[in-house]
Amino acid sequence: MTTPQTFSREAALRLEPVESLDQINELSRLADIIWQEYYLPILGPEQVSYMLENIQSKANLEEDIETGKLDYFLIKSEDQSAGYLAIQLQDDKLFISKLYLLQEARGQGYAYQIMQKMVDRAVKEQKKVLELTVNKYNEGSIAFYEKYGFVRTESIVSPIGGGFVMDDYVYQYPLS
């Protein structure tokens, strides 16, 4: 059994672009851990397994990166991986596709630091809004996004195959 990582609230976060095979392997490892620990109670074991095999698999992550569909980043705290982030620059917005933290890294102010970095990036890229989707039953994340200033703009249900859907809210954070 591995010793749980410890993360410091005072640690500055670094977003490390995922480019190498080692980084993709680390991304895949994080996806497996985070989805198992966080999403089992929300989505159930069948949907978590399906999503890990068909959406968050190493092959799918590699394809997303190689095709430029998403820009992935390892979230680093003092050279330890605390989670991962995926974004996509769209016409007038920066879309946050994925923002996942290890259990030990939650509650340390990291999500706030990441949002500040995303606001800075979006402003630099001359975008008008940050946008993300969040599962309707992910109460902790919803509370954070609303406290940060995101506004719920719509409710969507998207089939993902295997008889499963993503049942999400869309949130936006205006930059002007």
Image: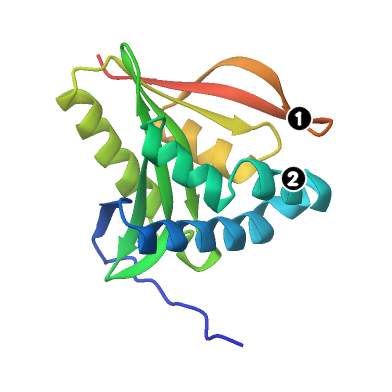
Tell me what residue is drawn at x 66 percent, y 42 percent. Answer: 54
Tell me what residue is drawn at x 71 percent, y 37 percent. Answer: 137
Q: Image height check: is 73 above or below 66?
A: below
Q: In the image, which disc is placed on residue 50?
A: 2
Q: Earlier in the sequence, mark 1 or mark 2?
A: 2
Q: In the image, which disc is placed on residue 161?
A: 1
Left or right of 108 on screen, residue 48: right
Residue contact between numbered discs 1 and 2, judged by CB atoms under 8 Å: yes
Tell me what residue is drawn at x 52 percent, y 86 percent. Answer: 3
Task: Say which amino acid is labelled 1.
Answer: Gly
Left or right of 112 on screen, residue 47: right
Residue 100, percent from left and from top: 50, 50
Residue 144, percent from left and from top: 49, 41
Task: Say which amino acid is labelled 2.
Answer: Tyr
The kind of secondary structure element at disc 1 is strand
Tell me what residue is drawn at x 33 percent, y 51 percent. Answer: 18
The kind of secondary structure element at disc 2 is helix
Left or right of 6 on screen, residue 41: right
Q: How is the image coloured?
A: rainbow
Residue 166, percent from left and from top: 70, 30
